[in-house]
Amino acid sequence: MECWHCERPSHANCQFCGRAVCKTHTQEKPFLLHTYRTANGQYKAFVVRKAVWCGVCEPQSDPIDLKNME
Ligand SMILES: [Zn+2]
Ligand SMILES: [Zn+2]
């Protein structure tokens, strides 16, 4: 695979969209790995703090409604 930005060999893939990026063009973003609810009703999340991000795609912070899924 080649880097999305410069077309040199890539070192990683964006955690969010899968684009390939080289070390120069890799950026970092927190990645939400898993969420759960504690016994007293609190929501908690496991987050990877420096996940690989391509710098192009735009991970949304809020979930969107899905329609016509049936
Ligand atoms: Zn690059
Ligand atoms: Zn991406």
Image: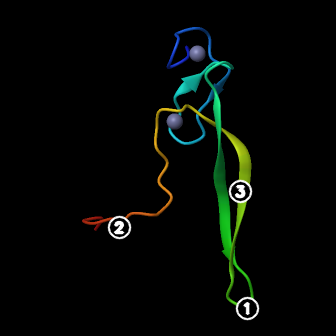
Task: Give the percent coordinates (x, y) of residue 63.
Answer: 45, 64
Q: Which residue is mark 3?
A: 47
Q: Is 21 situated above or below 16?
A: above
Which residue of the protein is positioned furthest toward the bottom in this rendering?
40
Task: Give the percent coordinates (x, y) of residue 12.
Answer: 66, 26
Classify mark 3 as within 8 Å of ligand 2 or not, answering yes or no.
no
At label 1, which amino acid type do we have?
A: Asn
Q: Quadrant of ligand 1?
A: top right
Q: Which residue is mark 1?
A: 40
Local packing at callout 1 (Cα closer than 10 Å; few below 14, some 14-19, many 20+) is few
Task: Give the percent coordinates (x, y) of residue 53.
Answer: 60, 36
The quarter of the rendered structure image containing the N terminus is: top right
Local packing at callout 3 (Cα closer than 10 Å; few below 14, some 14-19, many 20+) is few
Along the line of sight, the residue nearer the viewer: 3 or 69: 3
For the residues labelled 1 and 3, say whether their Cβ atoms are less than 8 Å apart. no
The residue located at (30%, 64%) in the rendering is: 69
Local packing at callout 2 (Cα closer than 10 Å; few below 14, some 14-19, many 20+) is few
Task: Give the percent coordinates (x, y) of residue 6.
Answer: 53, 11
The quarter of the rendered structure image containing the C terminus is: bottom left
Q: Which residue is mark 2?
A: 65
